[in-house]
Image (cartoon, helix red, strand yellow):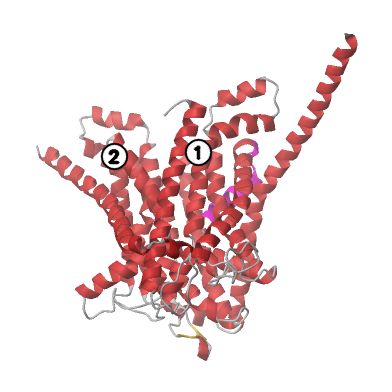
Amino acid sequence: MFVKIKDAIVTIILKLAAMLVVGILIWFLYMVLIQGLPVLSKDFLFGLPKEMEEGGGVGPELFNTFYILILSLLFTIPVGVGAGIYLAEYAKDNIITRLIRLSIETLASVPSIVFGLFGMVIFVIKFKFGFSILGGALTLSIVNIPVVVSVTETALREVPQTYKEASLALGTTKWQTIMSIMLPTAFHKILNGIKLAIGRAIGESAVLIFTAGTSISRNYPEFNPLSSGETLSVHLWYVKSIGLIPDAERIAAGSSAVLILIVLIINVVMNYYEKKLRFKFLGVK
Amino acid sequence: MEQSVGYVVKRNEKTRLVNSIVDNSMRYLLLLCALLTVVIVVSIIVYVSKNGINVFKEITVDGFFTSDYWSPDEGEFGILAFWRGTVILTLLSISIGGVLGVLCAVYMSKFAPRKIREIMKFAIDIFVGIPSVVYGFIGLTVFVPLIRKVFPDSTGFGFLPAALILSIMILPTVISISEASISSVDKSYEEASYALGATKVQTVFSVIVPSALPGIITAIILAMARALGETMAVQMVIGNTPQVVNSLLEPTITLTTGIVMDMGSCEFGSTWSNALFMMATVLLMVSIILILIIRLIQRRQVS
């Protein structure tokens, strides 16, 4: 009898913990959206920011966010997927492989601010890029490599061995098998890693403050990768902690809502494609 | 007829040659990608610590770590308040977020119906995607005013709001890794326990959770790495005052927030800047040690 009561109580505690976690998330989203949604308008999203007066927008910051995101993915995806393929398909159990694995695990847990300082020393000072979109994007791509590598490796390892054997038996080379059988089959899982990288790239700020800088170019839109490029996340932090804009509260609330909406949209869209691809290649829902 | 067969054979040989060249060169190209990660890690360690070590040309090692007096204008660089802040904040957030996260992971993997588990997985995906500055923004606009209301004597800034925000931020790390490790415990353990007449809760807590313990500890350590490295959200609510405090409600500082506050105002190469790089080196070393601990745990589990 006592055991049964204990069972019931513990089950309820666990359920409460889970409800609390989901509840925190819903409350969190609610607090951001209720403060930020009223701010959103065409002028806010695409308008120019103002330094000293009210009513500025976040157009250039929003543009820089996506510009830096795309530039960083151009580097992260080939290197990350490439290293993942190597670890899954070629790596033998030797000291070099162990060193690579240790490096990737280390890279995954390096604090953002340390990446920021590293990017500053290498790209801003040594390569003389200055605070720039390119410096920010390259630093960010380093931050994102480990997640893409480990997701790619796991995804490739989970492809049924028979697929690979069937392809090799038909006389293809290893590389042809990887490109035409392994990667397409594992693609929906790799997409999940890319989703994480996109989320990090959009939300990251500590990495970008000292690499992409906290100011924007005079031109809008600015495509020159060597001009300084404050992103939306950095802007949100800047107006709230350092800036002198009188309506910092409004800018911050609006930017938060925009960031949350981007995160939600990316998750929904990518999940949809992931399911579709999984169905296409594996035939399971 | 014979001629065309010869042509096909010849062409096949040519394709085969091209294929084998592509095959071999791709192999090395991929190895290069993988080795690039080693190069990056080594250069991060070298460049960050090289600048950091320069600080000891002017400040003694002992004074740097044990003095609580930080005043760059007077040439005083003691980082006691900074590292103490990081340690206290990490422990506080682990004890709140770690416990909640593990309980949630247990529920998710062993009690939740499939539909609810799907919903929770989606919720965790969203959690991961929320930018740190947005966490900071909520801390600043919701937690700080609330604390100020409950404790009217305080400014609302300090360890308390920072620990609350950080506990939420580490939840996805704790939950997803513990959940994976609990779910991967061999089904036969569970069945054996039921066969002995144990209830579900008894089975979960005396059989499954102990077997998944290495994974759960890994989750907690990774969450610690996340907590001690978090910068922006903490910076917005901790108060950024380099002082040693013994209360949860007084403004203080951590290593990461100290770096982000001061880096913009000092000249690269100065003692001040080197001191900040040394703080970054400390963070880097601690996270490498945490990774090595995780590897030890995993190796023990395998053997």
What secondary structure do most residues of the magenta stretch adopt?
helix
Image mark 2: chain: B
Q: Residue furthest right?
A: B3
- Which residue does the numbered mark 1 point to in the structure image? A189
Front-lying residue, A144 or B284: A144
What is the quadrant of the N terminus of chain B in the image?
Answer: top right
Tag 2, which secondary structure?
helix
Tag 1, which secondary structure?
helix
**Is residue B195 in view?**
yes
- Which residue does the numbered mark 2 point to in the structure image? B116
Q: Residue at x 31, y 58 (%)?
A: A28
Label annotation for residue B79: none
Query: Looking at the picture, does residue B8 appear above or below residue B254?
Result: above
Q: Which residues are magenta?
A: A90-108
Q: Residue at x 44, y 71 (%)?
A: A56
Residue A37 x %, y %: 34, 60
